[in-house]
Amino acid sequence: MTLLEALILGIIQGITEFLPVSSSGHLQIGAAILGIESTDNLLFTIIVHGATVLSTLIVFWKEVLSIFKGLFKFKLNEETKLVLYIIISMIPVGIVGVFFESNLEAFFDGQIIFVGAMLMLTGFLLLATNFLKAKNASGNLSYTKASIIGIAQAIAVLPGISRSGATIATGLILGVDKEKATRFSFLMVIPPILGATLLKVIDLIEQPIVHSQISNAALAVGFIAALGFGILACRWMISIVKKGSLVYFAYYCFAISILTLTSQFI
């Protein structure tokens, strides 16, 4: 992997992790276009996902600090409820991660046609936010809503389905306030990504890449690019949801889906 390829993939990860267009799908498409081997992707994936977690913590540092302060009051308050909602939302993706992730990765890795189809599905989900309760969402989170949003996050393990798009759109459709749905979407992903990254690190330790094509410089470039663009994309996404502009990303997903599917038959 060259420095330019690392920069491009880092930017893709940083932007698409937070925008509702599927980071996993775009990374697979980008890796396929650049001709990067999947064995090299594991180490790079660990690095750039770590960068996007850090960007989330940077953007939401006040909220994270408030959560910890609230927890140490040892009573049922808003911060404690939020932690409980996050824990509930983690159960579906935890089950998928523990029992099915390796099978899913083996089955869908490099399947660009499947990625294109799932991007189409993401587009329809985002389009749905223009209807139902999503248009004037103003409600609060609940244990039931947190669990349903968690199921959406678990389904988003499939490459091509946007995690942020699926969780935010589901929250809006359930009638959750736009700002609360966005904040919850970004905070709820921190523990699963940290857990998934840890599992990948364990895999890397157990089966080290002997002849990796990725230099330390390329890893550093990818990390910095994902971190910087992740911060920008996270803040931009918050603003986008407030303005109710998710429908434009639906059109983008449709366009990329059509281009991706078309490219596989030409």
Image: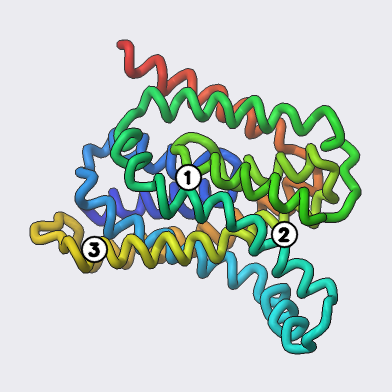
Query: Which residue sits furthest top?
Result: 266
Residue 15: mark in rendering: none
Decide: is 181 above or below 249. below
Tell me if 1 is positioned left or right of 258 in this view: left
**Which residue occupies 83% across, 72% down?**
78
User: For residue 248, which quarter of the picture?
Assistant: top right
Front label number (1 vs 3): 3
Residue 204: mark in rendering: 3
Of label 2 and label 3, which has the lower sequence position?
Answer: 2
Kindly report the distance in space between the C-alpha atoms of the residues bearing marks 1 and 2: 18 Å
Instruction: Point out the image quarter for the C terminus.
Output: top left
Of label 1 and label 2, which has the lower sequence position?
Answer: 1
Q: Amino acid at mark 3?
A: Leu
**Which residue occupies 48% across, 23% down?**
117
- Check disc 1 and report the residue beneath it: 23
- Check disc 2 and report the residue beneath it: 183
Secondary element under disc 1, as helix, strand or loop, is helix
Kindly report the distance in space between the C-alpha atoms of the residues bearing marks 1 and 3: 21 Å
Do callouts 1 and 3 mark residues in contact (Cβ within 8 Å)?
A: no
Decide: is 37 above or below 71. above
Kindly report the distance in space between the C-alpha atoms of the residues bearing marks 2 and 3: 32 Å
Q: Alpha-carbon neighbours of circle 2 within 10 Å: few (<14), some, or many (≥20)?
A: some
Q: Amino acid at mark 2?
A: Arg
Decide: is 78 above or below 255. below
